[in-house]
Image (cartoon, rainbow, N blue to C red):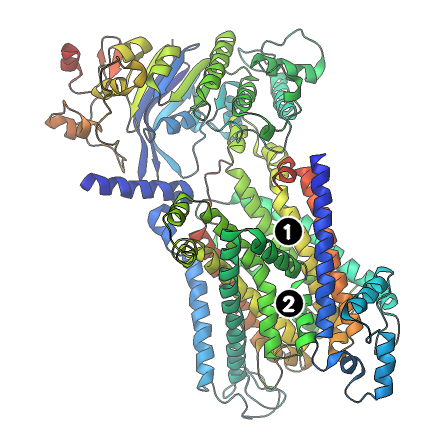
Amino acid sequence: MNRTTRVKGTARAKRTASVKGTAGGRRARRLDPLSLTGLGCLLLLVLVALGSLVHAGGDPDAIVGPRLQPPGPGWWLGTDNLGRSMLPRVMEGVGTTLLLSSAAVLVTAALSAGFGILAGYRGGYLNELVMRVVELLYSFPAIVLAILVAAVAGPGQLAAVASIVLVTIPLMIRLVRAAAVAVAERDYVTAAAISGAGLPRILGRHILPNVAGTIAVQGTYALSVGISVEGGLSFLGFGVQPPQASLGVLIRQGGTYMMAAPWLIIGPGVVLVLAILSINVLGDGLRDRFEPRETRALI
Amino acid sequence: MRLLLWWAGRALSSAVTLLGISVLIFAALRLMPGGFAETILGPFATPEQKAELAVRYGLDQSVFAQYGHWMAAVGTGDFGTSMISGQPVAAELWARLPVTAQLTLLAVAAAVLAGVPLGVLTALRARPGGGGVAGRLLSGLGVSVPEFALGSLVVFVVSRYGLQTSGYLLPAAVLSIFAISATARTTRDAVLNVLVEPHVTAAVARGETPWFIVRHHILRNAAGPVLTLTATITAYLLGGALIVEYLFNLPGIGSYVVQAVGRRDYAVVQAGVLLAATVFIVMNVLIDLLVGLVDPRLGRRA
Amino acid sequence: MSALLEVDGLEVDYGTARALDGADLRVAAGEAVGVVGESGSGKSTLGAAIGRLLPRQAVVTAGTVRVAGEPVLDLPPAALRRLRGQRLGFVFQDPIASLDPTMRVGNQLKLVLRAQGREGREGRDGHDSGGGRGGRGGGINADVAFHLGRVKLDDPRVATAYPHQLSGGMAQRVAIALAMAASPELLVADEPTASLDSQVREEVLNVVFSLAREEGTSIVWLSHDLPAVARRCDRVAVMYAGRVVESGPATEVLGNPVHPYTAALARSAPAAATPGVRLEPVPGRPPVLTGPSAGCAFAPRCPFAEDRCTTERPEPVRVGTQDVLCHRAAELEVIA
């Protein structure tokens, strides 16, 4: 008994040692400090967004002071061209941006999981069709595709969400499909199929858990792409429409008064970059965690 | 022979994708709320105007015939006329092409010339357990600052301190930050993947110097993913150019399309989108050819 | 006279796992030594340590490795490269992956020959860089053909092929040609035939051993196959849990094993089986060390173990022709 547990433990230790280097078993299974910091930043932003719902930073539409005031007591991020405090407006912007992006990423993840797994496991015509559509979407530069969507659907939140979905879905479907193909070839899946397990059971119980890591990693990256796309689209005026605030809208508006009041653009700009950066860093950490790389290099 | 067949197949499949894209763009325009005529002419158009438009665009014919006419026109380089200026879209695109091409090419050049060495160096310096915090933050930052945020900052600094901007260097710099970072990250990953291959160990065991090994055994092996990324980056840059041109007020194709979307000038949007997608697909085929030449395994595998 | 290769008390850790726990090995010039052990016994680590080819996370905590008197683990980079390039040759398990997939075989060989030519002009002690191709004209292409011919690859198409177009056996011969191109003094082969089928295996081994004999190259052959090693090598070293537990003349180690582990290994080999007698697998599993073993690492599986075996590290003792790490070696020799 004792021996078997020891052997198991050591086998695992050896595998992680060969894959993760000196990191050892425990660190390989946990996120590193930088990624955790990224996660912390993201959670903080979510908290900020939730706070904006209860006007924690103040009423975003209330006029609190003179126009275009630099940061100071009463308006910690300055005031805009109407004399509104920027703090609650940035908080609302974070909320809008995060909500739209994460809604879009959820749609992307659900569609990718469904079509990617099915295409990867079933192959055949379905696979052909899915991959064709994916390649089609993949052929558009992100912001160009977003603009096409905005042109068709009309500027607004729906255009922003639809754009993010269409921009992020090709890569995720591809990778989920590839992961599903790799799993589908394994013996235990074949064994499950032979023993009469139904399709939903095979897909849900055997394949989905194995591609979940890919979905998590890609979903994280997709969220950062989503924030960037929403920002760009709203910045061009085709996404979220004022008076609703989003980070892109705020940066667009701040640009107009950039000379007189640079804080209008610096506040939302810093928050936007911080959001994307922390998500990307988190994504890198998740990738190292779920898809560890061999690090036995000699030079 | 087999390679030739593969290339032929690749070209054919690209042609099919291109066809699909044209259908998508065509359908997108016909699907617009309010109908095509109203979209083009606005809600206050007279029935006579609508009838004239219907004849001009063949709206009385079947959808397939309409698509055929449009494709035939596009095939001869006729992208229709701009609703706002009344000028042929093709001529306007052609006049604006040099700006966008210069911007994009400068950024691609920067991506390759700076990103590849950066990626190789960081890969060689990489230690197990990941790079330093500073390095990871910097590499993350490079792909985390959207053009419109960085561009706004640059425009602000330039106008605040009255700096002279010469030509396209500054906009291209803004555009290339992401491209350089993305190329460096991909190169680093690709090189790290090659470094652990047994043939590199074998080269080390033969007493070859690190620089010799990089030059002869690593660069070529790592080229595949980096080249493939270059195609993607180029497409991405076409999108980024759109934002940078808008920001810096440059007379390129991007700013033309942004204006057109704002004014609902659909012939221009249609042409711009089709152009961007075509460039991407053509780039992809060219890059695939190149990859096949550099890495003999790839042509076979596909 | 000192040996060509001297490994003394080598200890190597990977993080918390210990791969080598005080390994000793000696190889004389021109000698072929087989290093035998189960996977995880540390033989690959030992092989890599000879050329300081250990992965970065490996930490050498004690011991020395000397090749022709040079302290391999303490050499500055340039001297280390010179040692690897001139005195050492390596052949690895996966033949096709050991070749650069983007380069034709002939070009890889040319690259090695040119690099070696440069070094040769800088001067080498003892060895002639021409390594058996002196006096022949015909330039680099002829050299390529010559080196491929030495490993019995006479088909001219081989030189223009990419590695993925070769069979495993052919690829391994190319790898051998690359490793032997510089006429090294010591060739370290880490299970070079593990992925080949038995017929090809014999051919590749013939090529390695005859070429090494021609060149006067010593061989360290790492393998898990005791009888196969004993057939080809002059001496055999048996590894268990990061130590060489028994070493001596090949026929003696196989025929009259002293260490209980060697004896068990010899009994478990199908080739050594007497028809009608059951093969005896070695009971239990090899341990994975997380630090120095307190006593003899084989004690938990050893039928002859006594108290001190689990508490006291055995020191090498000479029993007949063999060096053995066993407290009870002398008694067991009598029993045998």
Judge depth for marks 2 and 1 and give the one in front.
Answer: 1
Q: Position of residue A34 (x, y in %)?
A: 44, 59
Q: Is residue A193 left or right of residue B222?
A: left
Q: Position of residue C26 (x, y in %)?
A: 36, 16
Amino acid on which the number 1 mark rests in the picture: Leu
- Of labels 2 and 1, earlier in sequence is 2
Give me the disc on residue B42.
Answer: none
SS type, badge 1: helix
Give me the disc on residue B150.
Answer: 2
Q: Nearer the viewer, residue C334 or A149?
A: A149
A194 w.r.t. A144: above or below: above
Please give the chain letter of the residue carrying mark 1. Answer: B
Amino acid on which the number 2 mark rests in the picture: Leu
Residue sitting at x 53%, y 10%: C126
Residue lying at the far left of the rendered structure: C307
- Specify the quadrant that holds the C terminus of chain B: top right
Q: Which residue is mark 1?
A: B229
Q: Can I make out residue A187 in this image?
A: yes
Q: Is residue A156 left or right of residue C39?
A: right
Q: What is the quadrant of residue B158 in the picture?
A: bottom right
Q: Nearer the viewer, residue C300 or C245?
A: C300
Q: Is residue B178 left or right of residue C192?
A: right
